[in-house]
Image (cartoon, grey):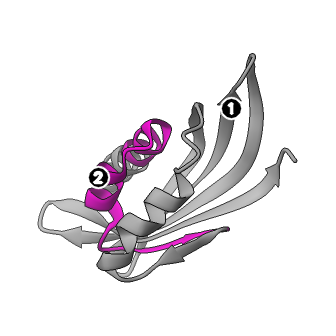
Amino acid sequence: MNPAEARHLGANLLHTYTEIADTQDVDAAVALLGDAEVRFPSGGFDRPEDARPFFERIWSARTTHRHDVTNLVVQPEGHDWHARAHYVRWMYEDEPAVHTLGRYDLLLATTRDTLAVRRFTVAREWSRA
């Protein structure tokens, strides 16, 4: 896979995740990340059977929010690809307000003509109290 294809597919995976997170779609999150090693500041999982309970727990509050992703970089890492990006999480209460600034870090495995998420890490750099 060439670097342009890897960046395109990596961007699609990352933006698919943020769309899933914004709608808090547990089924879609499990489908996308259930086989990956996932780490958030509040926990994570590395076994498929732990994916659903994890996403149900972190999205139980049913808040209205949106993620914006910037600074995506995708680079080769052996036969796989390493992606990293910044994110801003907006909360919608009375009016939109920045709630969280953070980073995504992904290890993307090459499978045939596409990529799959092998490791997904979310790191918060700042969060509104």
- Rendered residue at 66%/39% (across/down): 89
Q: Position of residue 47 (x, y in %)?
A: 35, 82
Task: Say what amino acid the circle numbered 2 marks.
Answer: Asp
Q: CA distance from mark 2 to mark 1?
A: 22 Å
Q: Residue furthest left?
A: 112
Q: Please give left or right for residue 34 compared with residue 123 in the image.
A: left
**Depth check: 50 or 32 in front?**
50
Image quadrant holding the N terminus, namely bottom left
Q: Which residue is mark 2?
A: 27
**Vertical relation: 1 (above or below) 47:** above
Whichever of labels 2 and 1 marks the residue nearer the N terminus, that label is 2
Q: Position of residue 75 (x, y in %)?
A: 46, 64
Q: Is residue 79 visible?
A: no
- The local secondary structure at tag 1 comes to strand
Identify the magenta region.
Answer: 15-41
Task: Say what amino acid the circle numbered 1 marks.
Answer: Met
- Rendered residue at 30%/58% (across/down): 32
Quarter of the view holding residue 122? bottom right
**Vertical relation: 6 (above or below) 35:** above
Q: Which residue is mark 1?
A: 91
